[in-house]
Image (cartoon, rainbow, N blue to C red):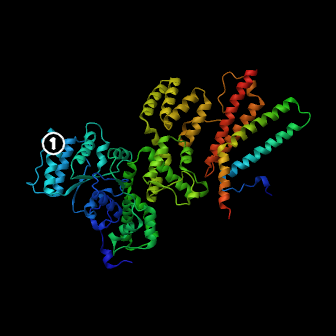
Amino acid sequence: MMQMSDRPIPTHNDTLSALITELGEESQQVAALINQLRLPHLTPQQQVEILSELLASVVHLHIHCDASFQDLLVAEIEDLTRAEPD
Amino acid sequence: MASPTTALIKENPYIIGRPIYEPELFFGREDLFQFVADNLAKQAKVILLHGQRRIGKSSVLSQIPNFVRLPDFVFVSLSLEGQGDKPLAEVLHVLAGEILAELDFAPDQVALPDKAAFQQRYQVFAELFLPQVYRVLAGKKLVLLLDEFDVLHSNGPGTAVEQFFPYLHEVVDRHESLFIIPVVGRRLNDLPNLLNLFREAPYQEVGLLKPEPTYHLITEPAKGVLHYHADALAAILELTAGHPYFTQVLCFAVFTQARERQQWQVHRVDVEAVIERAIEIGEGGLAWFRDGLPIPERVVLSAVAESQRQRAEAPQLATDILTLLQHHGVELTETLYQAGLRLLEWHFIREPALLPSAHPRHVYDVTIDLVRRWLVKRYPLRDEILELEKLDPQAQRLYGEASQLYQSGNLTAAIAAYEQALSHNPNHFSSLFDLANAYWETQRRDRARALYQRLGLVDPIRVAMFAPPLPLSEPATELPPNIAASVLQHPAIQSLVQRIADHQTKIAQEQHKPHPNWNLIAHWQMSIHAFEKSIQQLCQRLESRR
């Protein structure tokens, strides 16, 4: 059975759909890394490894959520608002 | 349905490749003739007509005497074709001779000063010749209809161009009985200059025909022979947008087909069946139409044609022309923006028929669909963008110098020269390709890779054949010199490197799809750039703490 997370996001714009999926994956990764950091008895080396992964995720999220992504979101919101019956 | 009479008809009644001199075969333009009549009546000394190539400007000019009925004005049609290289005295002598021939004066009524007299003093045109003409016209005004007016504008120094316009301007100002109606449109670039020269002149565009006169132009020449059904008329209008030349070309092809098949009823399907043939017949006119455009306008026009094709195939992937050009590796410049605006202003392109609220920015249609079909076939965007190289002679010169330096093995100097060429013209793709190679050879792999990536969009085949292979797993960043291996093995660097590799894989997979999503690819490329930047900063930081 198809997982909820595998389903495409039903937007009008394929790019936006793909980017939202990617955002979800990266966010899950961040949440998982933060949970790992909460684990007791981590060695300093383990902490470095988790924080390194977190750094890469944060760099990715920073560029991923740039102005063009925000523009796509706003455009989709506008489209949906226009399409909504009075 | 072939009748005995129609079967015998051999001659195609549609006229292509020459102006329409026959008033009975000329349709529409009532507004334009009214504009001319109103302005002449208001004593406007100069009326400027302009329009695209092949829009029917010469036909309009030749019909002014037939359709502008003002008893106080006498019209004389003159063509300046072929006069561009001649000195002013010679041009004026030719014009004087043509005026006499057109007015059909008896030889003893007006004496034409000989060529030597003009050469000695070209002012004889206004001082001796024209006053005699006015005398014979007995109070009527002389209107010179000047075809190919702008031909004089495109030539070098020493020809009539430097003196003709100012002189004509001065004579028209001084002579109460002299009026001129020039038509321009050979080159899009020339119009602003001419409008500037005749600043006070009223001007009007010779544009597309409205539907009604277009239908007349389609049906009248073949009346009683071909019967066009309403769907056929609509199909022709959709394809030609009321452009008289292309309408005649299409109808010429329709007639030829009808004659071959002896089938004289025309439906939409018959029109659609002759599109290819019409493009072949109109090839000369189509090329002439495009040749009048400067290179940036040609590129934008092909971009519009390509974006329309993509929209037709996959409406959900509608790409605006600016993004489309970027997806082909073109750097957007002010010249390209301006070219788009000018194409809109000149009605070569138009906004698609959508509600304004639904209209995305920078999405356009080629106004004449027949032109769009021809462009997609003959001038695909990928070929057309290569023309952008020719835009800046300085960049061309620097590229030549850089190539010599490259061949002599002086890569550092060659790199500087290529960079300089690109600062003059960021779309000089030959410089871009050689620069990428030079960076690769001097071990600046990061820069080389960025350039190859852009070149892959411009000319994927050339990059695939001639660029060095780009390993995906290699750190894609140009690292500061002397970075210790231990720094490169740092988990933070490694995780960023891994992210670059992941994104490169995603790009490669997307590029192999039948319809790659270029917006996503551009997004991932930006992400790679961000990872690279982050690696650089991190390396410097870790190195400094070592």
Which chain does the residue under circle 1 lie in? B
Relative placement, left or right, of A78 versus B152 is right
Q: Looking at the image, can residue B150 be seen?
A: yes
Image quarter (top left, top right, bottom left or bottom right) of the N terminus of chain B: bottom left
Q: Looking at the image, can residue B18 be seen?
A: no
Q: Residue at x 62, y 31 (%)?
A: B446
Image quarter (top left, top right, bottom left or bottom right) of the C terminus of chain B: top right
Q: Position of residue B376 (x, y in %)?
A: 48, 53
Q: Position of residue B463 (x, y in %)?
A: 55, 39
Relative placement, left or right, of B178 versus B508 is left
Q: Residue at x 53, y 45 (%)?
A: B325
Q: Quadrant of residue B209?
A: bottom left
Q: Quadrant of residue B529?
A: top right
Compared to B124, does B536 lie above or below?
A: above
Q: Position of residue B454 (x, y in %)?
A: 57, 39
Q: Residue at x 22, y 41 (%)?
A: B88
**Which element is circle 1 on?**
helix
Identify residue type, mark 1.
Phe
For disc 1, the marked residue is: B118
Compared to B286, does B431 lie above or below?
A: above
